[in-house]
Image (cartoon, helix red, strand yellow):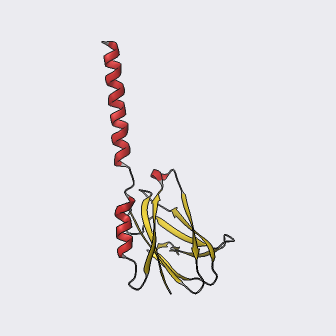
Amino acid sequence: MKKILIFVCIMFCGMFAFSANAQTACNSELYNNMALKMLTPGYTFVKSYRIDGKGGERKKIEYTCVFSKDTNYMIRMASKDGNQQGLIVTLFDSKREQLISSYLNDTFFPGWQYKCSATGIYYLSFTFKDSKSYCGAAVLGFRR
């Protein structure tokens, strides 16, 4: 009887932990579709980015990309906190110098537009500020 009671307790705790984890999961696909709708007409979709901060465990998520000279790029974001709230995307060049950010003067912007001046590797850095969910998505588009 004691073994059965212990087994039931372990199963109950396992189900509770699974249920709690499922409730806090980041469904970035939903926010990806929202961000895609914000891409300005005339821009061609290039890539989407999942932004899952794992409930605050990951403070920074970074991706590399190759940009081409004389091409206009646009990034748009959506987050679980509401539109772009709590989510910042910053573009860095190959020397890790900041070029543009979606957070300026205590204001969150839904993204940015950037005209590339040199072909090369660039870094998209996603960070969180005052976020409650640490979940979102972004889309990148280009126009020549």
Q: How many marks?
A: 0
Foreground residue among 71 and 96: 71
Q: Is residue 128 above or below residue 46?
A: above
Q: Is residue 84 above or below residue 5?
A: below
Where does the image place residue 93, in percent across and percent down from the top left? 64, 74
Location of residue 3 by image quarter: top left
User: Residue sitting at 34 percent across and 48 percent down?
Assistant: 23
From the viewer's perspective, tell me whether residue 88 is left or right of residue 136: right
Foreground residue among 92 and 43: 43
Q: Residue furthest top?
A: 1
Where does the image place residue 115, in percent across and percent down from the top left? 56, 84
From the viewer's perspective, tell me whether residue 123 is left or right of residue 24: right
Q: Quadrant of the N terminus?
A: top left
User: Residue sitting at 47 percent across and 61 percent down?
Assistant: 130
User: Residue sitting at 55 percent across and 71 percent down?
Assistant: 90
User: Residue sitting at 42 percent across and 57 percent down?
Assistant: 132
Where does the image place residue 56, in percent across and percent down from the top left? 48, 52
